[in-house]
Amino acid sequence: MYAYLWTVATFKEVVSLVSQFLSVILDVCWKLNKWTLLGGTSLRLLNLISRQQAFIGGGPAGLVTLRNLLDRGQFDHVELYERRDDIGGVWYYDEPQDSNKPRWPSPAYKGLIGNVLPEFLGFSGHPFPEPPSSPHQPFPTLKETYDYLRLFAEPFLKDGKIKLNRQVVRVQEIGLGGGWQVVSRDWNHAGREMEEQWDAVVVAVGWWDNLVWPQTEGLDALRERGLAKHANSWRGPEGYEGKKALVVGNANSANDIAAQLAPVVHAPLYQSIRRPPFAKFVSLENERIVKVSPVAKYILKEDDKFDALLTDGTLLADLDTVQLGTGYRPFPSFVHVFEQGVEGKLVSIVSDSTYPPRIPSLHRMVLYAYNPSLAFLGAPLPHTPFPIADLMSTWLALAWRGEVPYPDTPEGRLVFEKERLETVERVRQTVADPSSLIVYSVLGPYEQEFAAGLRVDIVKARPELDSVLPVWNDERTAVREAMYQIKYQSLEYARDHPGPVVENN
């Protein structure tokens, strides 16, 4: 019968038969989660195929993941693609220059000072130096944080592991365990498009490209006229002198913008808020800032003026600008995976219809449940992003090596997401007007539980890392919580002892 098949079947039919055979074999291997070779040595299937790995994003999460996959995972061929001309992500502040290359500016701005102390910024084995600031300002500046990241990245830049000016435009799943097709543009060579195939991909692009705009009536008209700006584009108060201004939001970005605008705009500066700020979003009272209700409607007028009608009926008349600190979302729409239940159809892993908004189907917020050779770093938003990224990428390195176990089936790998969604929904049901921070992707009070669970897995596989990795427990959480009061005191000192704006270059 086999001879007959080979003599009469068309080439297409042969390919189809071989594909079906391979599909069955791969499915069996995946379910058994083992692959046997070299005299009976059993390896995880993913450990076999994840030898060549591409990283997307040269911010803190991407850099520490690169280090951990090389040093702790000891994988053969790992490269990081960064679309800008330097590493650092949000911490790399660059001025506009005449260039034919596209530009992706950081949302950072001159004078930015962080709100996380050095002890919660460093990567394991590479502590953050004490900043050369006064005792009254112990928080690293934008430049100090960039300098730390640049020093950390230097060895990888020198040996070519980091490719700058490489913009990844599409990541596409390949069938039959074929890995991932990565399409990129090389802006070192006029944006030349390149296609490559990788065994595994880590997406560490952060949230900052994906702005969240309120669905407020009239806002689109203001955006079209350049009267409404997102915090992502804030570069300082220059140009707003004497203007009538409104700031929307009361998290870190909105509070910083309000504090910078207040001395120069026409008084009062209005700040629209839904509720009193959380304690972690530290700001000072300012007699030039008036807190007002949420905006119900914007009304565009002649001469680029507008009114803002508030939900309590108050009308703010003849405004010149509104600055919106309304946040970001994770939205890596350039990643395409096979749609579940539809053979051969590729779809974006996330869309505007993804609800609740998140990167869906991630085990431990890292591994894509349906194909764990795809991973994400930066899917959750924690209080301490540097050590969390360090921990998550160490866990990933050991999971891909087969040293840290994870569920064998997609269904098992989806349990984490299901339980997390249920937990968040229970909390939201207890609040009359739930905050936009009580969502799937914001770890909030669950950061300690999340991190401690990953750490347990890591130390069980590699006991020697117990003394290297930061600890998450009640004591350390209390220390972290105390730093927000320290931040408040530093703001008071800066107000009472004004000095020059901190330079970032």
Image (cartoon, rainbow, N blue to C red):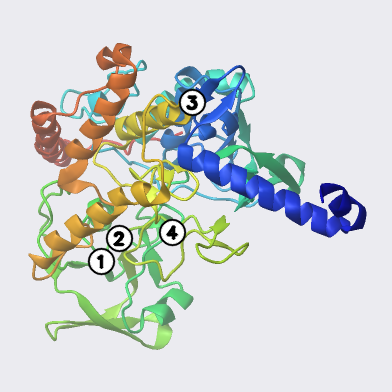
Please name the residue that numbered disc 1 is placed on.
248
Q: Is residue 462 above or below residue 314?
A: above
Is tag 4's residue or tag 2's residue first in the polypeptide sequence? 4
| Place of residue 433 in the rendered image (x, y in percent of width and height, measured from the top left) | 12, 70
Please name the residue that numbered disc 2 is placed on.
325
Q: How many residues crowd mark 1 within 10 Å: few (<14), some (14–19), many (20+)?
A: many
Q: Is residue 323 above or below residue 305?
A: above
Q: Nearer the viewer, residue 314 or 164?
A: 164
Q: Nearer the viewer, residue 468 or 276?
A: 468
Name the element at disc 1.
strand
The alpha-carbon separation of the residues under discs 4 and 2 comes to 13 Å
In the image, what residue occupies the spot 31% across and 18% down? 129
Q: Is residue 396 above or below residue 378?
A: above
Q: Which mark is residue 69?
A: 3
Q: How many residues crowd mark 2 within 10 Å: few (<14), some (14–19), many (20+)?
A: many
Cβ–Cβ under 8 Å for marks 1 and 4: no
Closer to the eye: label 3 or 2: 3
Under mark 3, the amino acid is: Leu
Under mark 1, the amino acid is: Val
Q: Which mark is residue 210?
A: 4
Is tag 3's residue or tag 4's residue first in the polypeptide sequence? 3
Q: Is residue 166 above or below residue 262?
A: above
Is tag 2's residue or tag 1's residue first in the polypeptide sequence? 1
| Place of residue 2 in the rendered image (x, y in percent of width and height, measured from the top left) | 82, 48
Name the element at disc 4.
loop
Residue 446 visible: yes
Residue 373 visible: no
The alpha-carbon separation of the residues under discs 3 and 2 comes to 35 Å
Q: Which mark is residue 365?
A: none
Is tag 3's residue or tag 2's residue first in the polypeptide sequence? 3
